[in-house]
Amino acid sequence: MGGAKCLLLYRPDSGGAPATADAELLVAALQRVCGVPASRQPERQLEARCTQLSQAPARDLSVVAQPRQLSDLWAIILPNTVPERVFLCNLKATQVVEADSCIATGLLDRRLEYRTRSTFAISSRTWLLGDREGSDVAVRLLQIQAHGQAPLALALEVEYRPVSSCAAAAAVLADLAAALQGALGAGGRLDLQPAPWEEYAAWLPPQASPTHTAVLYACLVGAIIRERGQQAAAAARKPGQQQQQQQQQQPQQQQQQQQPQQQQQQQTRAAAVS
């Protein structure tokens, strides 16, 4: 049985891409909040993979790719849960639909290409809160990256099940988000995706379907793309801002250079009059 889900996008204090230390910080927070066995080997493996994509295909891997001839559409494949289905999303409108069987077949025939050339890959490691057999909360640490590159973002996927009502799910997920943020401390912050929460909770389904997961991943990828665009725009503005500052400083420097000359001329005239 599925449940209600939300995503918490990790924002490092540095403001840039996450580093291995950020993954370790999130793992430590999960260890404090969730019941994790004494063995830390899986966590060490995840930390080691945070800086470089493993050569072997990840078992729990979702891919988000942009079809070459459809500029506004992206494909989302969830091979760990529904490997035979493909979801198409419009990131600008945050609309997700399941692809028709003929389209899905064509895309799945290129599954290996999507694994090796996908625009984004989302790999995950799952923690269960409390008793592993009867836990009603699962938290997944998501690592989002382009193929063969360092991670672009880290996020937490929180699932609560079973769901009796949307109001109950919203309250539980909000409490879990606050607990995870508290365990994280001052090392960074977790932003709820999609925001605002009130609008998201209004259409929260009774059970988390694969389409629901695809919608969440689309929101996550959209947030990352927007942030990368803002960073690129800020970097492009810096040379222009520096040039503008230099142009503004030039008159001030010229004025400062002229002041001693004017004072000397005034002193010369005063001496001539006397």
Image (cartoon, rainbow, N blue to C red):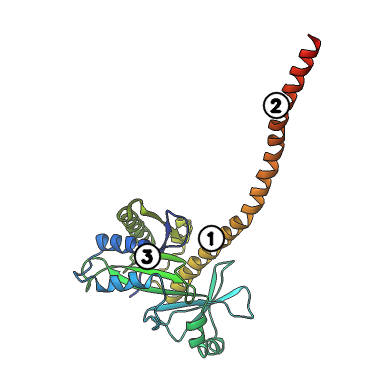
* Residue reaching furthest to the left: 38
According to the image, label 1 marks what residue?
227
Quadrant housing residue 25: bottom left
Q: CA distance from mark 3 to mark 2?
A: 56 Å
Quadrant housing residue 262: top right
Quadrant housing residue 51: bottom left
**Can you give x and y, in whole percent of width and height, for residue 105 in the image?**
52, 90
181 lies above or below 92: above
Q: CA distance from mark 2 to mark 1?
A: 49 Å
Mark 3 lies on a secondary structure that is: helix
**Number of numbered tags placed on the structure image:** 3
According to the image, label 3 marks what residue?
20
Q: Amino acid at mark 1?
A: Glu
Position of the C terminus by quadrant: top right
* Residue reaching furthest to the top: 274
Of 186 and 215, the residue lying toward us: 186
96 left or right of 165? right
Q: Earlier in the sequence, mark 3 or mark 2?
A: 3
182 left or right of 217? left
- Badge 3: few (under 14), some or many (20 or more) residues near its Cα, within 10 Å? some
Q: Which residue does the image show at 26% across and 66% down from the upper left?
A: 129
**Can you give x and y, in whole percent of width and height, for residue 186 in the image?**
35, 50
Q: Amino acid at mark 2?
A: Pro
**Can you give x and y, in whole percent of width and height, for residue 16 in the image?**
47, 59
Q: Amino acid at mark 3?
A: Thr
Q: CA distance from mark 3 to mark 1?
A: 20 Å
According to the image, label 2 marks what residue?
260
- Badge 1: few (under 14), some or many (20 or more) residues near its Cα, within 10 Å? few
74 lies above or below 23: below
- Badge 2: few (under 14), some or many (20 or more) residues near its Cα, within 10 Å? few
